[in-house]
Image: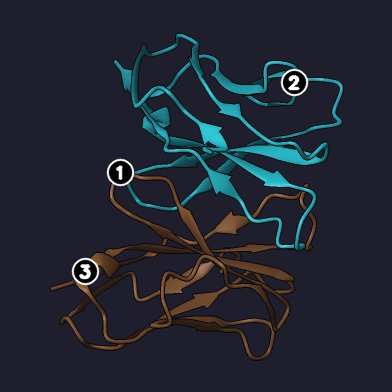
Amino acid sequence: GAGVSQSPRYKVAKRGQDVALRCDPISGHVSLFWYQQALGQGPEFLTYFQNEAQLDKSGLPSDRFFAERPEGSVSTLKIQRTQQEDSAVYLCASGPRGDWDTEAFFGQGTRLTVV
Amino acid sequence: AQKITQTQPGMFVQEKEAVTLDCTYDTSDPSYGLFWYKQPSSGEMIFLIYQGSYDQQNATEGRYSLNFQKARKSANLVISASQLGDSAMYFCAMREGRGSGTYKYIFGTGTRLKVLA
């Protein structure tokens, strides 16, 4: 497809379980963002990649959260030892350049529920 | 300090009428971009319109226009001729030009729009 693809769409995890969320950005896009969106809230920034380099991880809430983009295309967000407060929709977005004046294209998100 | 403020949690509009969704922002960076996204119940964030801080004219994209008042630091979205399919959550967002080079989006809390038949 031509858009940003995220998988799985839904994930239920038991507390303490590790999860991995995948993002396939638009081919050739340089920028890649991960956002966390709690129910009824706006998306909150987690981390940013430019190609394979993780330039900003200031939004990651704890060291249980880890993201990678080893070849500058597909990215994975990993959450270790999940907790109930990790329940949210995780959005991935990609952009054609690393500039501030271009829009990013978002995927449909992965809804994570920790029980 | 909150950088993007959307004061309308919910709005109703009659089909075929126009509606304005409010957004104010706060930044000291002279270079910034303002974006509006639509999020239907399916969850995907759909880009609607962009306004750059140096743009002299208000942005327009089809039925969407952005009422940019730089001195007031407001960037309101106007949707003309509302359609039932416009019912969704709408987010205002900003990207600042300065800083670490992340140019991350900062989002508001959103406005839920309901179009009535």
Kindly identify which chain the residue marked by label 1 belongs to.
A
Amino acid type, callout 3 = Thr
Kindly identify which chain the residue marked by label 2 belongs to.
B
The residue wearing badge 1 is A40
For marks 1 and 3, the one nearer the N-term is: 1
The residue wearing badge 2 is B70
Letter of the brown chain: A
Quadrant position of residue A84: bottom left
The percent coordinates of residue A111 (x first, y second) are: 30, 65
The percent coordinates of residue A5 (x first, y second) are: 50, 70
Quadrant position of residue A14: bottom left
Amino acid type, callout 1 = Gly
Q: Residue at x 61, y 84 (%)?
A: A69
The residue wearing badge 3 is A113
Q: Are marks 1 and 2 on the same chain?
A: no
Q: Which is more toward the observer, A11 or B30?
A: B30
Alpha carbon separation for disc pair 1 and 2: 28 Å
